[in-house]
Amino acid sequence: MKSSRKSIVLLVVALSLLVSIPSWAQESTVDKRVENATQVLLEFMQSPDKEVPMELFRKSAAVAVFPRVLQGAFFVGGKFGRGLISTYDAENQSWSAPAFFTVGGGSIGFQFGGESIDLILFILNKRGIESLLSGKVTLGGDVSATAGPVGRTMAADTDILLTAEIYSYSRTKGLFAGVSLKGAIVAPDNESNEAFYGTPLNARDILLENKAQPIKEAEQLVKTLKQFSGK
């Protein structure tokens, strides 16, 4: 009985410490998330295997990056991760500041045990973006999504760009592949948006309405998107 009470007390203390984490610590966490996402994007596009087609990147209206998504039986639905999305503004010919999102649940196309994986989603049109901004959206249900084509060039497969709104890729231990995320739920992470920008902003404010002020911590991400998209 004493042991049980002690465990409960320790749990309460631990939870209170989590709740009382200062804002600067959360800001540091989201800054690191942007840094990790930028690195993942670089590694995807600079891989010797050259698996992600450049045409797909150039045709994308937005790109989502989820570094180190955890998966395993101890997670509800098998996986959970935090990442970000940036949209391309064709009128101003520029990539937006990042908005933070989460991904969870669903079933992944193949499993790597309890390891973490990196995910990249290429969103091809405004409808796909609007779906992700609507709240919790289910990939393959609320919005069409499928595993991305493999190979740097895809001239022979151009028609596939008309059949889905989102194409997904994963990487673990240097292995790249198109991956199905059917049933995965993507949702805005507005708490992280506020921590990063220092003001209440939702994903729509950032991605479509350009209300986020330029921030130094996102500069390298935007440069990387511009470099590999060619726009």
Image: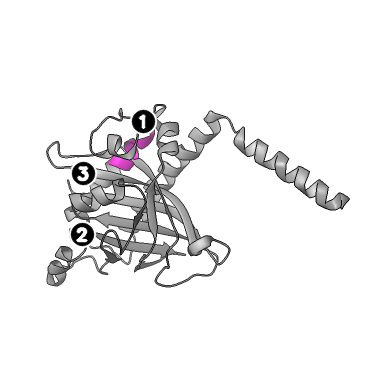
Q: Pointer 2: residues within 10 angstroms few (<14), some, or many (20+)? A: many
Instruction: In the displayed orientation, state which residue is furthest to the front.
Output: 1
The secondary structure making up most of the magenta span is helix
In this picture, residue 72 sits left or right of residue 55:
right
Q: Distance between the residues labelled 3 and 1?
A: 19 Å
**Which residue is pictured at 62% across the width and 32% down the height?**
20
Q: How crowded is mark 1: few (under 14 residues within 10 Å), some or many (20 or more)?
A: few
Q: Counting residues from the N terminus, which is met first, the one under dot 3 or under dot 1?
A: 3
Marks 2 and 3 sit apart, C-alpha to C-alpha, by 13 Å
Q: Which residues fall within the magenta stretch?
A: 214-222
Q: Of the numbered discs in the image, which one, if any, rests on residue 216?
A: 1
> Which residue corresponds to mark 3?
88
Position of residue 82 measured from the top left corner of the image (x, y, whole percent): 44, 49
Q: Mark 2 points at which residue?
A: 56
**Where residue 11 sits in the image (x, y, percent)?**
72, 45
- In this rendered view, identify the residue nearer to me: 162 or 188: 188
**Helix, strand or loop under label 1:** helix
Type of the residue with mark 2 = Leu
Q: Name the residue: 42% across, 32% down.
A: 194
Q: Distance between the residues labelled 1 and 2?
A: 28 Å
Left or right of residue 204, residue 93 in this image: left
In this view, the residue farthest toward the right is: 2
Circle 1: residue type: Lys
The vertical placement of 6 against 178, above or below, is above
Q: Is residue 46 visible?
A: no
Given the image, on which type of amino acid does mark 3 rest?
Tyr
